[in-house]
């Protein structure tokens, strides 16, 4: 079990460039999340997904798009990168919590992607 | 809407001393509460969680936390600090049936030899 993996680990972009961050999980989890972490601000939710083919906006969605075409993968896209998007990005996943359907609690995190936009 | 407040962005304790990291929550309904730890250049790892069972929750690495509804608190403690406890700690809250976690701003714990 690799758990939650993120690709790439580091990336430097110029303003206006685009890129896609890939998150993959091999735990058959229903829920997946993208966060950004900035100094003194904790983790803020960008977008999330409650199942394959679904996505929803989190706290700070502007400038980002996501897709969940396969249950195990959750992609985060930056169409036109800005310096304000310089951050560390974390992906997480969580399972349904039996006996309830549609309920989850513990999230499992990837190692992060450090993105710098110049 | 739910929120958490972590008092003290930096806490320093001597090796062997008590560790106390504070977390207060705000929620209109009974919450789920979590403590996560982040070691340098790594992702977050669950330390412990409260999901409406026992109010005193024991986690990994000797940490525990007590849910106190009257004080809206979920403080993290460890009786004797170890050098390996140096990390950043995040408190988080979730509402039952709502799949989103809301994190506090974190407390960086430094252990003094």
Image (cartoon, coloured by chain):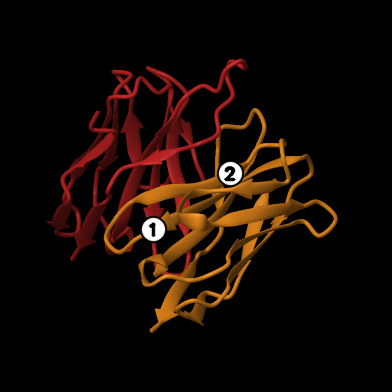
Which residue has dot 2 on it? B49
Residue appearing at x 39%, y 51% in the figure: B44
Q: Secondary structure at mark 2?
A: strand
| Mark closer to the chain start, 2 or 1 | 1
Chain that bears disc 1:
B
Report the quarter where the C terminus of chain A lies: bottom left
Q: Is residue A60 visible?
A: no
Above or below, comparing residue A110 to residue B66 in the picture: above
The disc placed on residue B38 is: 1
Chain that bears disc 2:
B
**Side of B41 where A56 appears, left or right:** right
Report the quarter where the N terminus of chain A lies: top left
Q: Report which quarter residue A70 is drawn in.
A: top left
Residue appearing at x 48%, y 62% in the figure: B89
Q: Identify the colour of chain B in the image.
A: orange
The disc placed on residue B54 is: none
């Amino acid at each position: 079990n690799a758990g939650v993996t993120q690709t790439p680990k580091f990336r430097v972009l110029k303003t206006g460039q685009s890129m896609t961050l890939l998150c993959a999980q091999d735990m058959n989890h229903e829920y997946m999340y993208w966060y950004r972490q900035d100094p003194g601000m904790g983790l803020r939710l960008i977008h999330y997904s409650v199942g394959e083919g679904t996505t929803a906006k989190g706290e700070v969605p502007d400038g980002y798009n996501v897709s969940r075409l396969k249950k195990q993968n959750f992609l985060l896209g930056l169409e036109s990168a800005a310096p304000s998007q310089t951050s560390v990005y974390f992906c997480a996943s969580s399972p349904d919590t039996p006996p309830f359907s549609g309920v989850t609690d513990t999230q499992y995190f990837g190692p992060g992607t450090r993105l710098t936009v110049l | 809407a739910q929120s958490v407040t972590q008092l003290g962005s930096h806490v320093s304790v001597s090796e062997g001393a008590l560790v106390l990291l504070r977390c207060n929550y705000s929620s209109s309904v009974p919450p789920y509460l979590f403590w996560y730890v982040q070691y340098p250049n790594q992702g977050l790892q669950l330390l412990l969680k409260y999901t409406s069972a026992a109010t005193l929750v024991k986690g990994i690495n000797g940490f525990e936390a007590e849910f106190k509804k009257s004080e809206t608190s979920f403080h993290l403690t460890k009786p004797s600090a170890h050098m390996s406890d140096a990390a950043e700690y995040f408190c988080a809250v979730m509402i039952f049936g709502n799949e989103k976690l809301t994190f506090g701003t974190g407390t960086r714990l430094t252990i003094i030899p």
